[in-house]
Amino acid sequence: MESYNSFNVAQKQILDAAKILNLDAATIDLLSWPQNEVKFTIPVRMDNGSVKIFHAWRIRYNTARGPAKGGIRFHPDETVDTIRALACWMTWKTAVVDLPLGGGKGGVLCDPKSMSLRELENLSRGYIRGVAEHLGIDKDIPAPDVYTNPQTMVWMMDEYETIVHRHQPGVLTDKPLQVGGTQGRRDATARGGVVTVGEACKILGVNPKGKYAIQGFGNAGQRAALLHQELLGGGTLVAVSDSRGAIYNPKGFNPKELVTYKLTSGSIVGFPGSAPISHDDVLEADVEVLYPAALENSISERNASKIKAKIVCELANGPTTPEADEILYNNRVHVIPDILASAGGVTVSYFEMVQDSYSFFWDEDVVHQRLDQKLTKAYHSVQEAIKEKKVHPRLAAMIVGVARVAEACKLRGWV
């Protein structure tokens, strides 16, 4: 697979949007780099008595529209450029959905799969000790990301509150309900994506009850499999992949049974009634809707011309390369870009912050209703930019996000 520097891709996307918006050189320069980067080390005593030093980062990309928001990932291949890119995309994501937030991201270079629960807790608490002065409900609000989860957030929240001697549950989001989490967070990313697919089907005249395929069957992929049928009134799931393999059934899978099988066996491979296929076959399946919910750069110039789906809803971060965007657009494949399609997660994280701030929590129906409203409005904002500027959807979403952040920077007098 082609190798891309994610931050170089992110900077090119900014430049492309800035040219169409006629932004001045100072504004472009400001938006092309993080405002604040913290690099630090975390000493952790391991279970065998040794001390291991972990390298970590927290980046606030832009806070013109509000405090930074973005996940913390524990990953063995973490780099500063990966975190810069993700913090950058979070900035546009919060702006596209019109949340009063900026963008941020954090990471630790580690192999969480080889660590015990105690070691992970020590690492999580050490991370917060390294960045506590930079966090806060009015500064920077982290959330989980790759290989972190609600339990990680509770450890981090507890460490933060121990340091500041105040109860501030809103400083970290995606927590369990018992300690300030919100209803509706678990499926928010997939739910937001499926909501945008529903809007796209109306505009394009695509049958939402047709065939769909899912690349990547982790949390987002599993939820999308279920919610596509629940929210769109049906549909036939014919092709699915995970890290261990890919399967196909032209008559369709029962999503509930497939999710149960995956959670029980650890993979979709061997699901009764399925035929094994290649990972590329899932992406290139003859379906109405394709959900890339796995790796970045999965759709590239190598395979973009073979994509048959009418709608591609990006639940993963950066699954489509810049070259592939042009090919898909020219082939009339409607891409719902990641900064819009996967914005349901940060939207409900924002709802969690709001509820934490006044210690009053909404029913799940209210969360779903408000998420639907936010994502529907954001989808049509991007759709208007596509028509007005005559550009592909990712560039249209970038134009909406960059324009809103640039305006806030100018109003503040930064540029």
Image (tube, rainbow, N blue to C red):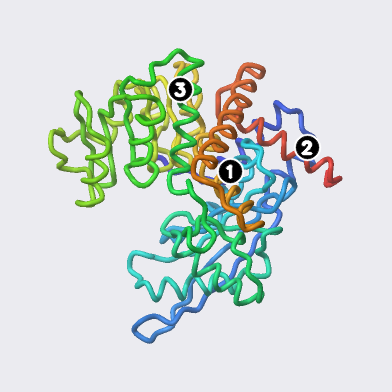
In whole angstroms, how far apart are the C-alphas of marks 1 and 2? 17 Å
Q: CA distance from mark 3 to mark 2?
A: 30 Å
Q: Position of residue 62 (x, y in %)?
A: 69, 49
Q: What label sits on residue 319 in the rendered view?
A: none
Element assignment for label 1: helix
As drawn, 42 above or below 357: below
Dot 3, crowdedness within 10 Å: few (<14), some or many (≥20)? many
Q: Indicate the quadrant containing the N terminus: top left, top right, bottom left or bottom right.
A: top left
Give the vertical position of 119 relative to 314 (above or below). Answer: below
* Label located before the other in sequence (1 or 3): 1
Q: Which residue is mark 3?
A: 328
- Image-based side of 23 in relation to 288, left or right: right
Circle 1: residue type = Trp
Q: Is residue 114 above or below residue 200?
A: below
Given this view, does label 3 or label 2 mark the residue nearer the observer?
Answer: 2
Label 3 SS: helix
Query: Is residue 356 toward the left or the right of residue 122 in the image?
Result: right
Left or right of 251? Residue 383 is: right
Q: Disc 2 on helix, strand or loop?
A: helix
| Residue under pointer 2 | 407
Closer to us: mark 1 or mark 3?
Answer: 1
**Residue labelled with disc 1:** 89
Q: Which numbered disc, 3 or 2, marks the residue that appears first in the sequence? A: 3
Q: In the image, what residue type sits under mark 2?
A: Glu
| Relative depth, front residue between 64 and 257 | 257
Q: Position of residue 201 (x, y in %)?
A: 45, 19
